[in-house]
């Protein structure tokens, strides 16, 4: 990015905040050419249209859309009926209209040049927009002569952005970007390179404008990347000042994306700067604090006080007030005190807008609607909701970020009122469908991209819960919403890449190589900037920019796939290929076609003997969705039937689930984790946890506490709690899944750490009733089934990483991160025995032991492409997980910082494995991201190309695991699929086949499998 882009970014941002440099009356009116002032219908229509450009366009909230008429027919609508009337008349009288258009365009162009800086005004923006539109209407031969390769849409978009008018800004941004992209693609289709003059006439849009566009259109991840790009460019300038404005945007966007770590870093950098007391700075800082409050539930009283101070001081406040009001109304149940204070602040703000006349008209309308939502007037609330519903019912309507937030606030207000719950559900469902469609066509398979959709996670959960309350059946794909979407996108891209494996395009390969070189240049630039002092703001920017370089690699891969898909669909027909770029794109077209062939219904990937149970945590409990098998005596298996129900859970019951898990994992010492499990739970006088008695409360919940609770009863065995949880979670839908042979569960929230097979139906454990497996979502199940169906080598090969050398170099203590410094890792003798027992089960195996069991050695195998030869990967090591990261702890010979194979390392691997065995502690744990689920090691290995993962839910017993894993693999190599083999192994251990000690569920229940049924072909 050029340096001038940075200057534009920071200068334009300050301009947008203060709006002081915009001269409201610098260009009093759009100038009229003599031909436009002449008599006749066309000049009159043009004059009327130009008046609307001045008076209507600045406050337009929609530009073009389709609207149903009285006959339910869709008719096109335009921001200005007068401008649309001229457009139609001009098209009908093209010969007469052409000279009129040319004359008016020249008159406006001349006036803008003469006005100079004074053209930076509302009328100037309207004039630029009129030129852009009239150039579009001009005959092609005359248009080029008058307009050339016009940047007018570019200039119009820039001015509307600076003036805070989102709708016209987005419209003209899209027009310019579309024209530029199409023209360059048209040149490419004719094997022509754009000339230097062409690129000068059609420059790439600057980062600041793209950032503003992405935020206005609800792509907050793109907005954050844009501002980071501008800040990153600033680092190249020696002694560059701190980019305060851009940093404020970064902080606010990070909070909105629920990226608390990044947000706090930006907050700290801003706090380290001199205090800013100007009106724009106060307003933007308040928006940052409101975004933080939305995540951390801050002080509403302080927010109201600061908003009112902005109003009193004549500072910009409407955007901050909109943010705060919409956040408050989107909450499940805001209290009366909060709503009363909000209503008072809204009333004050609206009165100030009306008194000064300085507020944007559409923003004032939104504040009035929000005020209505805080009140008790049912008719006003219903009117607001109806207006919002109409926006989502109109096809081709550009929905802005403000529209999404407004509709969400209106829907939640309706849902809280029993009389309007159905209407609120309809609006929220329409909003959800818009989001799901946007997520479905987004091909960027990164956690950062998905964060933009996950910020609506609470909305999806509300839709699921309310649907059960209203008795409305939803598809599981809608209930699960955006779960595991990063993984799902990666799986679908992988599937598309397989379809394109035999397609070759030399130009696409060359462009891919050039884009990879740009990514490497990004890395080199980061490296060349050096390491500033730890406390310097530049250090934080460098760390946050590092993933940005890697995203360039993902984007390069995506563009190459798009080029290959274009070649596959259109061959060498460049005209068709160019036309294809005007639609949904070749990759989306190919994906749509392939999915239609593969899946007829969302449950088609399930086996005829397989039931699927999905859990979605919602306020007050869970929505359980079950796809059950139905068998017709005459016709055999029928399609799965789907139903959902709401299962209420009190906080005490949720605590009982956590207590049950703690009791399962309690036992003798473990040596494959940084912590050790508790003492045996049964001390002879009943069940205990950490020596504390366990009690059943009067409400049926369970607690561990030293003092006997009132009406509490001592619990004698863990089985009693397992029975209670079965009645709560599994029994309500048992009749629908009991006839299946396999139950695949997609857990959510705390249930992701509960082994359901350990629950008890009376005297029968779930383990003995049905085979249990786990998966992230039903859509992921379908894509993993595709992956599992790919051809593979007849003989699976094993790569085993075990018994690392944990001798720690004495000079390795300095500069360790805080999370790493306190950890110590002991030798694991049982892991070598485990690995030695697995090796004979495979015809081909490779072992990494001792110092060779290192992160560097393992990653080197991947760099050489050798890791793709192994269908089974086995890790018998220490494991580590917290709420920030997950890792396998390998050899420490090269230092502690080089010992951790992090989940971020794993996602970059290139695997073709059927199974990863994680025989280490807590490998099923990790950071949890709203919407995505647990982002731990199994998730990372699946992103890298693995199909099935056996992982642990708690610290595993060294000796027990050394016996469990080989037993499981013997069953798998004997012909059972992986799901059946794991369940068979668990039943043997639970029955005492492998000794009384190993009946303890802390040994066998720790291991669960995520994936799909798959048999390891071939004999050892």
Image (cartoon, grey):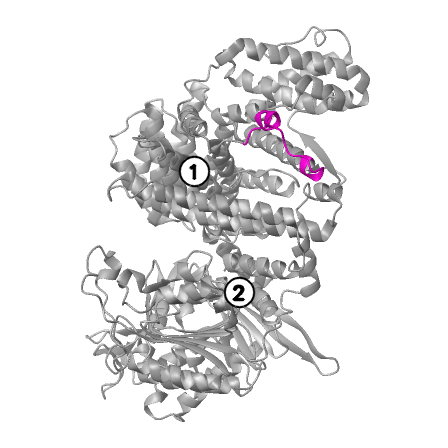
Q: Nearer the viewer, residue 822 or 473?
A: 822
Q: Is residue 417 visible?
A: no
Residue 800, image x, y percentages: 41, 76
Disc marking residue 229? 1
What residue is at 57 percent from the left and 75 percent from the top? 611
Q: Nearer the viewer, residue 555 or 311?
A: 555
How packed is label 2: few (under 14 Cα within 10 Å), some, or many (20 or more)?
A: many
Classify residue 183 as left or right of residue 520.
right
Residue 737, image x, y percentages: 56, 77
How packed is label 1: few (under 14 Cα within 10 Å), some, or many (20 or more)?
A: many
Magenta segment includes 194: yes
Residue 233, image x, y percentages: 40, 35
What residue is at 65 percent from the left and 58 percent from the top? 500
Question: What span is colored magenta in the figure?
Answer: 187-204
Mark closest to the chain's N terminus, 2 or 1 = 1
Disc marking residue 777? 2
Is mark 2 in CB contact (under 8 Å) with mark 1?
A: no
Residue 133, image x, y percentages: 66, 23
Which quarter of the figure has residue 906? bottom left
Badge 2 marks a residue whose secondary structure is loop
């Amino acid at each position: 990015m050029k340096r001038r882009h940075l200057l534009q970014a920071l200068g334009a941002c300050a301009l947008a905040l203060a709006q002081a440099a915009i001269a409201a009356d610098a260009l009093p009116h759009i100038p009229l050419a003599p031909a436009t002032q002449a008599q006749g219908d066309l000049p009159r229509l043009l004059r009327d249209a130009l008046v609307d450009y001045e008076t209507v366009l600045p406050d337009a909230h929609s530009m073009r859309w389709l609207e149903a008429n009285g006959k339910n027919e869709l008719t096109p609508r335009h921001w200005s009926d007068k401008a649309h009337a001229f457009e139609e008349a001009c098209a009908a009288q093209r010969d007469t209209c052409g000279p009129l258009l040319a004359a008016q365009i020249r008159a406006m162009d001349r006036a803008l040049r003469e006005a100079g800086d004074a053209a930076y005004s509302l009328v100037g923006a309207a004039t630029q927009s009129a030129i852009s539109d009239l150039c579009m209407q001009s005959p092609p031969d005359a248009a080029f002569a008058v307009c050339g390769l016009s940047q007018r849409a570019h200039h119009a978009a820039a001015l509307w952005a600076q003036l805070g008018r989102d709708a016209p800004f987005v419209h003209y941004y899209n027009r310019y970007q579309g024209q530029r992209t199409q023209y360059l693609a048209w040149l490419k289709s004719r094997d022509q390179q754009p000339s230097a003059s062409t690129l000068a006439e059609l420059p790439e849009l600057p980062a600041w404008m793209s950032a503003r566009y992405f935020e206005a259109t609800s792509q907050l991840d793109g907005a954050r990347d844009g501002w980071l790009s501008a800040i990153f460019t600033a680092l190249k300038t020696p002694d560059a000042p701190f980019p305060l404005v851009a940093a404020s945007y970064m902080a606010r966007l990070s909070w909105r994306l629920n990226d608390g770590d990044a947000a706090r870093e930006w907050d700290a950098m801003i706090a380290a700067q001199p205090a800013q007391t100007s009106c724009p700075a106060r307003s933007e800082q308040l928006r940052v604090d409101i975004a933080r409050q939305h995540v951390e539930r801050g002080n509403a009283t302080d927010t109201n006080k600061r908003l009112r101070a902005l109003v009193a001081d004549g500072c910009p406040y409407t955007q901050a007030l909109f943010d705060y009001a919409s956040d408050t109304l989107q909450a499940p149940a805001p209290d009366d005190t909060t709503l009363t204070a909000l209503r008072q602040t809204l009333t004050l703000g609206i009165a100030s807008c009306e008194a000064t006349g300085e507020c944007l008209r559409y923003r004032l309308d939104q504040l009035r609607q929000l005020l209505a939502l805080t009140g008790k007037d049912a008719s006003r609330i219903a009117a607001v909701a109806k207006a919002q519903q109409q926006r989502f019912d109109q096809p081709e309507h550009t929905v802005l970020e403000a529209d999404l937030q407004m509709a969400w606030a209106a829907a939640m207000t309706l849902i809280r009122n029993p009389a309007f719950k159905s209407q609120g559900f309809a609006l929220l469902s329409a909003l959800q469908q818009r989001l799901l469609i946007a997520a479905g066509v987004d091909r960027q398979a990164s956690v950062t991209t998905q964060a933009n959709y996950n910020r609506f996670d609470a909305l999806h959960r509300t839709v699921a819960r309310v649907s059960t309350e209203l008795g409305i059946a939803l598809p599981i794909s809608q209930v699960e919403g955006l779960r595991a979407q990063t993984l799902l996108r990666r799986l679908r891209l992988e599937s598309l890449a397989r379809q394109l494996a035999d397609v070759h395009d030399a130009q696409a390969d060359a462009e891919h190589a050039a884009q990879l070189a740009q990514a490497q240049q990004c890395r080199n630039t980061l490296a060349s900037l050096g390491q500033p002092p730890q406390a310097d703001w530049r250090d934080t920017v460098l760390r946050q920019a590092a993933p940005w370089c890697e995203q360039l690699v993902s984007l390069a891969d995506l563009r190459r796939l798009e080029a290959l898909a274009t070649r596959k669909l259109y061959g060498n027909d460049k005209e068709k290929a160019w036309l294809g770029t005007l639609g949904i794109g070749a990759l989306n077209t190919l994906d749509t076609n392939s999915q239609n062939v593969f899946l007829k219904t969302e449950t088609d990937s399930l086996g005829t003997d397989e039931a699927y149970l999905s859990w979605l945590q919602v306020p007050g409990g869970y929505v359980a969705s079950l796809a059950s098998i139905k068998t017709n005596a005459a016709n055999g298996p029928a399609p799965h039937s789907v139903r959902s129900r709401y299962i209420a859970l009190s906080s005490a019951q949720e605590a009982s689930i956590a207590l049950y898990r703690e009791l399962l994992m309690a036992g003798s010492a473990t040596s494959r984790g940084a912590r050790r499990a508790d003492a045996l739970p049964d001390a002879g006088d009943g069940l205990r946890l950490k020596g504390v008695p366990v009690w059943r409360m009067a409400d049926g919940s369970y607690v561990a506490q030293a003092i006997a609770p009132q009406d509490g009863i001592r619990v004698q065995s863990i089985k009693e709690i397992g029975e209670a949880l079965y009645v709560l979670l599994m029994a309500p839908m048992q009749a629908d899944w009991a006839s299946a042979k396999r139950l695949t569960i997609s857990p959510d929230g705390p249930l992701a750490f509960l082994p359901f097979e350990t629950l008890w139906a009376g005297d029968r454990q779930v383990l003995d009733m049905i085979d249990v497996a786990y998966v992230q979502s039903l859509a992921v199940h379908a894509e993993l089934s595709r992956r599992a169906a790919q051809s593979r080598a007849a003989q699976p090969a094993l790569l085993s990483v075990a018994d690392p050398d944990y001798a720690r170099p004495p000079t390795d203590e300095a500069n360790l991160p805080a999370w790493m410094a306190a950890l110590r890792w002991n030798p694991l003798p049982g892991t070598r025995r485990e690995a030695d027992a697995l090796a004979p089960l495979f015809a081909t195996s490779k072992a990494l032991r001792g110092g060779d069991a290192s992160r560097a050695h393992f990653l080197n195998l991947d760099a050489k492409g050798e890791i793709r030869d192994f269908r089974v990967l086995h890790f018998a090591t220490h494991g580590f997980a917290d709420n920030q990261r997950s890792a396998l702890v390998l050899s420490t010979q090269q230092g502690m910082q080089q010992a951790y194979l992090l989940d971020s390392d794993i996602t970059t691997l290139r695997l073709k494995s059927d199974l990863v065995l994680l025989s280490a502690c807590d490998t099923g744990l990790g950071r949890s991201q709203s919407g995505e689920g647990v982002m731990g090691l199994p998730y990372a290995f699946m992103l890298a190309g693995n199909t099935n993962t056996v992982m642990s839910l708690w610290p595993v017993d060294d000796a027990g695991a050394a016996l469990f894993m080989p037993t499981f693999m013997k069953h798998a190599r004997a012909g059972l699929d992986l799901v059946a083999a794991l369940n068979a192994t668990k039943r043997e251990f639970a029955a005492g086949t492998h000794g009384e000690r190993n009946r303890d569920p802390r040994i066998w229940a720790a291991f669960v499998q995520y994936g799909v049924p798959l048999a390891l072909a071939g004999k050892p």
